[in-house]
Image: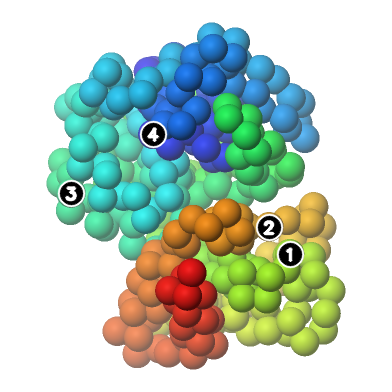
Amino acid sequence: MRYGVIGTGAIGGFYGARLARSGQEVHFLLHKDYEHVREHGLQVDSCDGSFHLDAVNAYRQAADMPQCDVVLVGLKTINNHLLAGLLPPLLHDDTVVILIQNGVGVEADVQAMFPTVPLVAGLAFICSAKTGPGHVSHQCYGSINLGNYSCQDESRFQAILSDFTAAGIQAAPVDYAEARWKKAVWNMPFNGMTVALNTRTDLLLRQPATRQLIHDLMMEVVEASRALGVQGVDEAFVGKMMQMTDEMTPYSPSMKLDYDHHRPMEIHYLYSRPIAMAREAGYRMRKLEMLEAELKFLENSR
């Protein structure tokens, strides 16, 4: 299949490069990196083995890209309004769009923009960062779960899973709602707390007081998911996420990197949207509401 990548950064760059390396036809939309990648290619430094793509199908404008069978969207959600102009040139009648983005409620809003486009949620469990022009640093993990939001063609969905697997990416099908809220169990505590306290994931878990707070925040996400009728998100999963983070390479999540580099933070889909959804279902995420307020204060003070 022909793949397109919108948002060739830490996530889109990594998965797109792995697919291209495995022999898939992949087309990359770039912004500031366009000239560099056209001349020098894409470099992925990875804990699973580094590699370089010499010849890259790189584009400065979406209008110049071919129609694709699958489009990976790795944009920050704060830029999703740009999809109205970026996606149409890449779409044909059966194009599947995979939103590899953080937060809850993303698919519903993109589906409203493109009512007939089959959408899949990409839940990436990866520590990866863009460290320079055309340069991705993959520190650990790297699997991706795919939650089918509106793709009616099961054979196409399975073919995508097979392509990811053939590229050496651990990929698995998951229930959409369960997967989004499970990702929120990790994202909501760690993204905001690393910003609010100017720290890393490992240091948050090293101190008893902040370790307990992280646990409490995770449990608020669990209770919110239960209020919304989502199955499979429980305290055992919280324990699994705590253990996984204990074993993880010391890490600054995407929101911390955005804050440190004076980029807008993804507060809406990571905090405001799930908090509002939980409140409408009768559950208050009180500690996460406080964290959301702190993040908005930091964002608006710059």
Between 137 and 106, the residue placed more toward the observer is 137
Q: What's the CA distance linking mark 2 and mark 3?
A: 32 Å
Do we see residue 26 in this rendering? no
In primary-sequence order, the first of circles 3 and 4 is: 4
Say whether residue 158 is left or right of residue 258: left
| Callouts 1 and 2 close, C-beta under 8 Å | yes
* Residue 286 to residue 171: above or below: below
Residue annotated with mark 1? 200
Label 4 element class = strand
Between 63 and 274, the residue placed more toward the observer is 63
Q: What's the CA distance linking mark 2 and mark 4?
A: 23 Å
Snapshot quadrant of residue 139: top right
- Residue at the far top: name it: 55
Residue annotated with mark 2? 252
Residue annotated with mark 4? 6
Q: What's the CA distance linking mark 1 and mark 3?
A: 36 Å
Please give the name of the residue rendered at 56% of the width and 61% of the height, measured from the top-left corner: 259
Say whether residue 292 is left or right of residue 246: left
| Callouts 1 and 3 close, C-beta under 8 Å | no
| Callouts 2 and 3 close, C-beta under 8 Å | no
Please give the name of the residue rendered at 41% of the width and 31% of the height, measured from the top-left corner: 31
* Residue 202 to residue 20: above or below: below
Q: What's the CA distance linking mark 3 and mark 4?
A: 16 Å
In primary-sequence order, the first of circles 2 and 3 is: 3
Label 2 crowding class (10 Å Cα cut-off): few <14, some 14-19, many 20+?
many
Label 3 element class = helix
Residue annotated with mark 3? 113
Amino acid residing under circle 3: Met
